Image (tube, grey):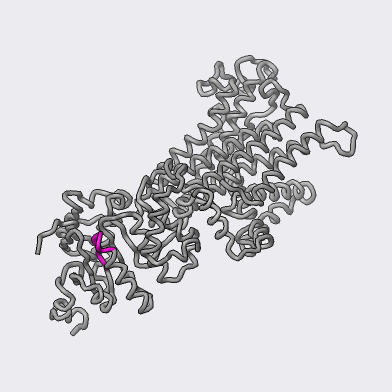
Amino acid sequence: MKLDRISYLTLGFVLGVALVLALLNQMTALGSALHVPTYVLALAGKYLCFAMLALAVDLVWGFAGILSLGHAAFFALGGYAMGMYLMRQIGTRGVYGNPNLPDFMVFLGWKELPWYWYGFDWFGFAMLMAVVVPGLLAAVFGWLAFRSRVTGVYLSIITQALTYALLLAFFRNDMGFGGNNGMTDFKDILGFNVQADSTRSALLVISALLLCGQFLLARFVVASRFGKMLIAVRDTESRTRFLGYRPESYKLVVWVLSAVMAGIGGALYVPQVGIINPSEFAPGNSIEAVIWVAVGGRGTLVGAILGAILVNFGKTWFTGALPEVWLYALGAMFIFVTLFLPRGVMGLFRARTSKEPEPEAPEVAAAHEVTG
Amino acid sequence: MIERDTLLYLDGVTVSFDGFRALNALSLRLNEGEMRAVIGPNGAGKTTMMDVITGKTRPDSGQVVFGKDTDLTKLDEPKIASLGIGRKFQKPTVFEPHTVWDNLLLALAGDRSPRFSLFARETAAEKRQIESILETTRLTDQRYRRSADLSHGQKQWLEIGMLLAQEPQLLLVDEPVAGMTDAETEQTAVLLREINQTRSVVVVEHDMAFVRALGVKVTVLHEGSVLSEGSIDFVSDDPKVIEVYLGR
């Protein structure tokens, strides 16, 4: 697998900024001009987790043509798995001091832990669930949808319905996931204080590493023969059947992989923002993720990462400076990108940097030399 | 003449869409190694016939038997394709963002599972096969071009090349020369005859000059059934055919 210059730059940027922020936070004194406050680490970590979600969306939308308007559901499920682990770590330090039950269960008058909370006090199990639960849900959903040849806008609508249904379900107190309030007030992760500067620095760097890992994995997938087939499925699905391919199984594989990637993003998101509640399932979140990808450049992977970081950076700035304008700005940006930058920020970048009339040709030629 | 084995046998195939009979008790027999031209006016059921053979449309009644005893009406498109039936569409449908080379690579016969394709590397045998198909379809110079940038005729050939890469026993070719220049049409006839040396071919075509150039047995369809069958001279002198084509 060969990476292009933009990929190297992006990987370097993500890792470099994360490391510099973490080091400046750890190595400088509180009053120093170079000191990076902890809230900045949390913000940067949040952007990187969103970038994982965007990468997951781009993988299915950009390469397999599945416009998911419910991808934040997988992100939130990963987040809930991490949230459950963090709740179990609180132990007797909760308001009610109950060693066996999280506060909200004591409040509801529950006497014992529901069976589906078993095992979540063990980090390894919780992290396994952060990928297994989104993956399993995606597998069942995808198997039903793709096998029935549901595509296009119909598929988008049912993905939206999926996340909305989960939103309503997680709102219910008797689901046992904290209802409306969700889970918060976390204390420890693997024995380290979640609020501590050092833990925040470590989480940021881990997020950067996992994002880069996900990017490399996604690159491997789209550069493989599998990825070429995905693009073929995206553009002319019925034609692939007459070549003997089963497009539904290709879509299912990439769909499940994408859900797992989103779940990992969600699991890292929760300790850094300190809360998980049903609003993460809100349909608007999934739509925003699609906008990040569109802004960055659909079908480029790098664009998804840049788009997520750029738009969320803008969101942080706007909601601080001009809170009432943000939604208009987001809408205007989406319209602007759709009209004038159909290939997103990446399209702009590619047009400016590449001198060759046909960027594919030398790359393919090189690929043939390498594999030969 | 030696009696050859039957490769494809349609028996009393009927397909209706909302009461309209696209195929009406159509029966047709194709021998192994044969090339057959299928002609007929618009709405005669040519494309529906291809849809039935390739599993896109299920017939209301009738049998479609491939080889010795495979009933195609029970199978779906990927299964039928992997049995060795390739199809070229009327409008050339190639994978436009991919290069000519990659289009052929994806079409090559082999394991179609996602697991295999994730880790597949191009083998020397695959390269040789692609090179030879490029030569047959006269696309060697275009191998690294994006297929979207090919001319209409080149796209048609690429799609025929993709069919060859599938190594089918039977090729179904829908209007291969529509929109081609005279020179391209001529070359396509040569190409199809070359292909027919090793495989059976069914060509659906409007262009009578092209059908004549192929010089094979012709089946005339009309309103979903066979109107006439025989050499091109025989069918074009058939009063029933003249009536359908010229009207009264």
Does residue A259 lie above or below A195 as drawn?
below
Q: Nearer the viewer, residue B14 or B83?
A: B83
Does residue B185 lie above or below B49 as drawn?
below
Q: Which quarter of the picture shows residue B11?
A: bottom left
Residue drawn where x is 17% and y is 57% of the image: B9
Q: Nearer the viewer, residue A186 or A328?
A: A186
Q: Which quarter of the picture shows residue A22?
A: top right
Does residue A270 lie above or below B169 as drawn?
above
A227 displayed left or right of B4: right
Q: From where the camera sits, is residue A163 visible?
A: yes
- Number of marks: 0
Single out the residue that lies furthest toward the bottom. Answer: B248
Q: Position of residue B36 (x, y in %)?
A: 21, 67
Instruction: Tell me, yes or no, whether the highlighted magenta stretch contains residue B112.
Output: no
Span highlighted in magenta in the image: B195-203
Does residue B88 lie above or below A305 as drawn?
below
Q: Position of residue A245 (x, y in %)?
A: 37, 49
Q: From where the camera sits, is residue B18 visible?
A: no
Q: Position of residue A146 (x, y in %)?
A: 41, 46
Q: Which quarter of the picture shows residue B135?
A: bottom left
Q: Nearer the viewer, residue B5 or A66?
A: B5
Residue drawn where x is 38% and y is 59% of the image: B132
Q: Position of residue A339 (x, y in %)?
A: 62, 64
Residue drawn where x is 36% and y is 78% of the image: B183
A112 displayed left or right of A336: left
